[in-house]
Image (cartoon, rainbow, N blue to C red):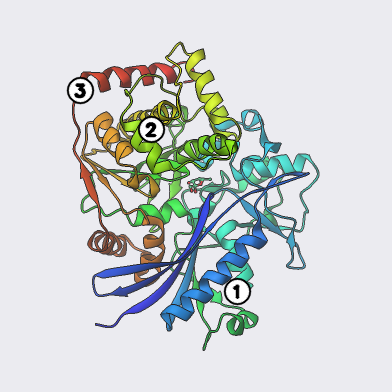
Amino acid sequence: LSTDTYVAVDLGATSGRVIVGRVSGRSVTTDTVARFPNEPLSWPDGLHWNLPAIYQNVLDGVRRAVRDAGDVRGVGIDSWGVDYGLVGADGRLIGLPYHYRDARTRGLADELDEAALYRRTGVPNQEINTLTQLVAERRAGALDPSARLVFIADLLAYLLTGQLGAERTLASTSQLFDPAGHWSEETIDAHGLPRRLFPETRRAGDVIGELRAGLVDDLGLRAALPVRAVAAHDTASAVAAVPAAGDDVAYISCGTWALAGVELDRPIRSEASRAAGFTNELGAAGSVRYQKNLTALWILSECLRTWSRDGRARDLPALVRAAADVPGFTGIVDPDAPELARPGDMPGKIARFCERTGQPVPATEAETTRCVIDSLALAFAHYVGQAAHLSGSRVDVVHLVGGGANNTLLCQLTADATGLPVVAGPVEATALGNLLVQALGAGTADELVAVRAMSAASSRTARYEPRGSPAVETARRRFEALLAPAS
Ligand code: LRH
């Protein structure tokens, strides 16, 4: 059997990686050739992405991939959603892309007409949305009328190939795209944005272009190398690689963020769905990812960042082990609370949340870690239940993919809280989805089934069975009560 080699560039909001995949017959083997932190820059005018560092890391990774793997068939790039760069009429990048946690959108999402936006785009208001960011820039007079908007993965593809475009799964995170498959012109017009800002869309599987001539030498390539569009939204790539055999599954893609939901044939734009905060984003083969976005492992990274200010580095796996040994379901928080989406003193914010809501306040690092993990498991159970209920879907098993699949405590508690088996893994679902979409196309549902089967055949998963207990039931009710005032 012949083996084809592809390179996946997977850019997450906390770290990036370059992974080589060798695809043969019914399986794929992967090799991570580069891993690098993605640290925002706090500049005088706000919080930005360090795009030059990302670009350099991507080039170094692709160079290493080509050196190690030899004959590479293509490169695919995926990234976190919502953020973008602006490219001027002369083709040059205008400034550095803003980070979605930059404060310029603070409070702004509340001013937008959510009911109308949800009907048009299937995406509820969030400060991080591309639309909110663009409205902030337009109001500040900072939007160049001749600019084009390019999402992060598409921006890297642009820097590598010179070709501009907007891959549809990424565009669907913006709150400017109709999940029927096109930009929402009404939304663009209603917010005073120029239509020319929005480039032509492309689909997973399309060839974007070949690497610029200048890079062919630099990367040690013998011939031109195609860059192919994948499901460029990292979550869409992860969902494409959920190793599910049947339809009755919910997914949780858990990393910096957690996205919990189900895949559907068409969007749900009902009032109840909007009130529950579900987004309708697109999947690799045009399906709808009906999901709730939650701040997730970032809450723990921020805790670690605060604790390690004493000069002693903390180790997350050790903290999770310690968390398993302290009593569970004491103080719990809503991971979707706005203050937990903002940087700075996370342990203090967690303590104040518990205090304000009349709960026991976690006192130690282990207790705070336990509080976060319990809260995530309860949130996952709540939103998996809501996704099933609002979409009328049956859910028999929950697939948890991404970095969270390494967290055994989180996986077991998610099984307990949902009352359903949890299949955890693959950890690198996003990169697998990226590689397999390049290899198999995945423009159709049949191809997507093949992608999932190959992912299942190629990855290690662990199964967690629910352990029914009255304590979980009580905690579930306490979690619902925490959400009640907001909804
Ligand atoms: C997860 C993710 C998520 C959101 C957020 C900004 O990495 O892509 O789906 O879009 O980042």
Comes first in the chain, label 3 or label 2: 2
Residue 272's mark? Answer: none
Instruction: Read off the residue under disc 1.
Output: 161
Instruction: Read off the residue under disc 2.
Output: 373
Q: Residue furthest right?
A: 141
* Callout 2 amino acid: Ile
Question: What's the CA distance linking mark 3 and mark 2?
Answer: 17 Å
How far across and how far down the image is residue 365, in percent?
45, 29
Task: Name which residue lies at 57% across and 35% down.
Answer: 306
Task: Name which residue lies at 62% across and 40% down.
Answer: 101
Mark 3 surroundings within 10 Å by alpha-carbon count, few (fewer than 14), some (14 through 19), many (20 or more): few
Provide the secondary structure element on which disc 1 rests: helix
Q: Ligand 1 closer than 8 Å to the CB at disc 2?
A: no
Instruction: Read off the residue under disc 3.
Output: 469
* Callout 1 amino acid: Thr
How far across and how far down the image is residue 39, in percent?
60, 51
| Residue 267 appears anywhere in the view | no
| Label pair 1/3, CB-CB below 8 angstroms | no
- The number of numbered badges drawn on the structure is 3
Q: Is residue 249 above or below residue 358?
A: below
